[in-house]
Image: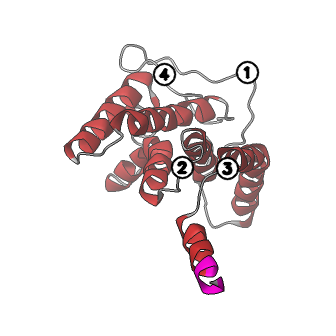
């Protein structure tokens, strides 16, 4: 499966796609990046039972799980009385779905290979015949072969998704609040 770098870059692309000509909002950006990585939080549950992979690639890596998590997030946004719940819900749903797409497009050498897209109705795992992303290893994490392998995987993710995120940012023409304040202060000092 891919690393948080790939998932975060996908989340950034989604944020930029829904933020054209808007002022950058760090909270929204953070929410979308979190949503893009949320499915892998099942690794943390595995730490509780001393097996990091015990719960990995189950409910959180399925279409029903993704929809359920998106509904919970939208309920939290609605309760918090966010002004733009439909836009935020759409961004978070797409960010959650991007996890499934990226993991489906990732090489997986674990058994069973792939992700259970239709869990709990089917335990069948799915993996694309075209793997764009190398898997990230979690075994022997601090050994040189694993470090080099993971660096290679992350480099590949950055080469594939990095340019897409940069183009998305450029096309979105997102306004930076501090840059605007700086321009106003500079204009005021000229007069």
Depth check: give the residue in front, 116 or 162.
162
Q: Is residue 57 visible?
A: no
Question: Element under label 4?
Answer: loop
Circle 1/circle 2 CB separation < 8 Å: no
> Residue at horizontal 39%, vertical 35%?
89
The numbered disc on residue 169 is 3
Disc nearest the viewer among 3 and 4: 3
Q: Mark 3 vs mark 2: which is more N-terminal?
A: 2
Q: Are there few (<14), some (14-19), or many (20+) residues within 10 Å of tag 3?
A: some
Q: Mark 1 vs mark 2: which is more N-terminal?
A: 2
Figure check: 83 above or below 151: above
Disc nearest the viewer among 1 and 2: 2
Q: Mark 3 vs mark 1: which is more N-terminal?
A: 1
In the image: residue 68, left or right of residue 66: left
- The answer to whether residue 59 is magenta is no
Q: What is the C-alpha distance between the residues marked 1 and 2? A: 38 Å
Q: What is the C-alpha distance between the residues marked 1 and 4? A: 15 Å
Question: Which percent across, then down, holds residue 24?
Answer: 53, 56
> Residue at horizontal 32%, vertical 29%?
68
The quarter of the rendered structure image containing the C terminus is: bottom right
Question: Element under label 2?
Answer: loop
Q: Mark 2 vs mark 4: which is more N-terminal?
A: 2
> Residue at horizontal 67%, vertical 30%?
105
Q: Which residue in the rendered view is the most extreme toward the front?
A: 191
Depth check: give the residue in front, 96 or 148.
96
Q: What is the C-alpha distance between the residues marked 3 and 1? A: 30 Å
Main SS of residues in magenta:
helix
Q: Which residues are magenta?
A: 186-190
Question: Which percent across, then down, holds residue 78?
Answer: 24, 40
Question: Which percent across, then down, holds residue 64?
Answer: 37, 23
């Amino acid at each position: 499966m891919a690393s948080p770098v790939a998932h975060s870059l996908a989340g950034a692309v989604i944020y930029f796609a829904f933020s054209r000509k808007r002022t950058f909002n760090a909270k929204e950006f953070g929410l979308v990046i979190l949503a893009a990585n949320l499915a892998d939080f099942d690794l943390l549950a595995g730490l509780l039972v001393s097996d990091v992979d015990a719960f990995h690639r189950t409910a959180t890596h399925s279409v029903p799980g993704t929809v359920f998590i998106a509904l919970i997030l939208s309920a939290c946004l609605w309760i918090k009385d966010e002004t733009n719940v439909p836009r935020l819900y759409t961004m978070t749903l797409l960010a959650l779905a991007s996890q499934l797409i990226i993991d489906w497009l990732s090489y997986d050498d674990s058994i069973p290979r792939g992700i259970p897209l239709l869990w709990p109705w089917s335990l069948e795992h799915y993996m694309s015949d075209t793997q764009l992303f190398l898997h990230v290893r979690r075994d022997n994490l601090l050994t040189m072969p694993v470090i080099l392998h993971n660096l290679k995987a992350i480099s590949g993710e950055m080469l594939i998704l990095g340019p897409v995120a940069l183009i998305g940012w450029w096309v979105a023409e997102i306004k930076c609040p501090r840059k605007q304040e700086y321009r106003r202060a500079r204009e005021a000092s000229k007069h």
